[in-house]
Amino acid sequence: MYANRFLKISSLNLQNSVRFNHAQQLKSDIKRRHIDKVLIANRGEIACRVMRTARKLGVRTVAVYSEADKNAMHVEMADEAYHIGPAPSTQSYLNTSKILEVAKRSKSQAIHPGYGFLSENVEFCKQCADEGVIFIGPPTSAIRDMGIKSTSKAIMSNAGVPIVRGYHGEDQSIERLQAEAQKIGFPLMIKAVRGGGGKGMRIAMTEAEFLPQLESAKRESLKSFGDESMLLEQYITDPRHVEVQVFADMYGNAVHLFERDCSVQRRHQKVIEEAPAPGLSEETRRKLGEAAVRAAKAVGYVGAGTVEFILHRVTHEFHFMEMNTRLQVEHPITEMITGTDLVEWQLRIAAGEPLPVSQEDIIRRGHAVECRIYAEEPRAGFLPRAGTLHRLTQPTPEENVRVETGVREGHEVSVHYDPMIAKLVVWGQDRNEALAKTKRKLSEYQVAGLETNVNFLLRLSGASAFVAGDVHTAFIPQHEAELFPQSDTVLSEDKAIQAALGYVIKCQHDSTANNSWKGISNKNRRRGVLIII
């Protein structure tokens, strides 16, 4: 499915493509580890994604599931599946003892954490090592150091990776933070040292706003991460969010697979991503890639990682923001422009193999876009929605179109988990072709039972500024009138009616000829007219 379309080498010779000296080859032989069964400590689309590649490689898969997911797609796909607890993630997908118990019972040699949940959990990584189970991810030290923002900034600065001017010190007294804020100047970004996902993050536009915003960030950080330590940084107004995919092996080799632009966000979370980033010079791309590789080597990285940068919209000057020590949600667009299967790389590197390619072997071709399809209400501040997908028609996957999903028609979107329904990933020869194809494929969605962001994504992918590549982190609020037109309500109702009609027609088609109206009450069959209530 994920063929090496663009690599300069044959897939049959991947293991021989990196130029090792004799000592490295000896190390490679020593570190080889056998993996023929892997437990996926996750759910939804990423669990299904990992299973597809594992199956391709002949690796058996083990699923874990909560009570809410007993009928989930990832449970059906796996070779084995084990119930691990009730719906709340703290009692199931975050229950490390249960997951390790299943790994032992199933005789899984490795655990793939996916993204979210335990993917960046230092203690879980340690527990896996203690139990003799391979954690498919970076070393514990890399997860720990990159998970503490002040530590990561210091490491990056020492490695020559540009960082934003700010304060990352241990003195967290109010007096010291106020003094440092005055030195940096306003506007100012306040960030939780152990934060992520937009939590524990505030902006103080003026000195008068600093203390109230600081206290707010501290409260949220303490509640979310158990730590109220903060770092302060110069706030760059409406920057771009550009990240670089990196990969490293156990032998000191590291490569980058070019950059992705993830600037358009809601609630500090990505909603549409593309690769490569539009409008950058080749010189800027080269510098981004080289900085990302330096970052990976500075922490002794192994496996898949993403180095995130803030990039100035006009000057294209960039600064290190953070490193995500896991596979990203948006990894498919990198796969599309490089012709790689990053999950296969993860499995092979975890088994002790060297990187399959050197930097010069990786070439970029075309343009890819990923849209995250969520059960949410964009007009209500993108509030998540839960319920049954009574009708779900998705685009048909094809060579340059991927639909990554973990649900199907009739499934529940639970209140307990992220409301993502699918990821639509398309590739085109250039950005214009990719965007045109994105709009065509988005228009093929039909969903009934839950509000989604499909209509919003259609408008976003066709918005004039987005098409022009003028993207930044404040894009959605700045283009609110175009993204939320008054006619949207009518459009949503029309779409809902179409989807409901499609569902009823499907029910009729699936019924026997003599009982084609089964399930529709007599009072709603008036003179051959179907009334939908």
Image: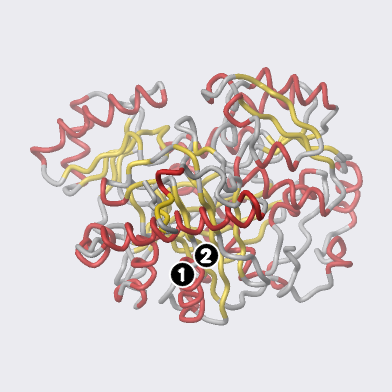
Q: Secondary structure at mark 1?
A: loop
Instruction: Please tell me the numbered disc located at residue 259.
Output: 2
User: Residue at 19% across / 43% down in the picture?
Assistant: 183
- In the picture, the disc for residue 531 is none
Question: Would residue 492 appear left or right of 445 to someone viewing this image?
Answer: left
Residue type, mark 2 in image:
Glu
- According to the picture, the residue beneath numbered tag 1 turns out to be 277
Q: In the figure, is residue 38 to the left or right of 387?
A: right
Rounded to the nearest whole Å, what is the CA distance between mark 1 and mark 2? 6 Å
What residue sits 49% from the left and 45% below the top? 520
The earlier-in-sequence mark between 1 and 2 is 2
Neighbor class of circle 2 (other Cα within 10 Å; few <14, some 14-19, many 20+) is: many
Q: How many labels were placed on the picture?
A: 2
Q: Position of residue 224 (x, y in %)?
A: 39, 26
Name the residue nearer the viewer: 45 or 307: 45
Q: Position of residue 210 (x, y in %)?
A: 15, 36
Q: Nearer the viewer, residue 497 or 335?
A: 497
Residue 163 rendering spot, x and y as whole percentages: 39, 52
Quadrant housing the N terminus: bottom right
Q: Tell me which residue sits at (64%, 22%) in the image.
A: 96
Residue 177 is drawn in which quadrant?
top left
Q: Considering only vertical position in the picture, is 142 above or below 502?
A: above
Please tell me whether mark 2 sits on a helix, a strand or a loop: strand
On the image, the x and y values in percent for residue 508 come to 58, 54
User: Which amino acid type is shown beneath numbered disc 1?
Assistant: Ala
Q: In the displayed structure, would residue 17 be above or below residue 109?
A: below
* 1 and 2 marks in contact (CB < 8 Å): yes
The answer to whether residue 229 is above or below residue 181 is above
Question: Which of the pair 140/392 is nearer the observer?
Answer: 392
Q: Which residue is found at the position 57% from the left and 30% from the top?
A: 121
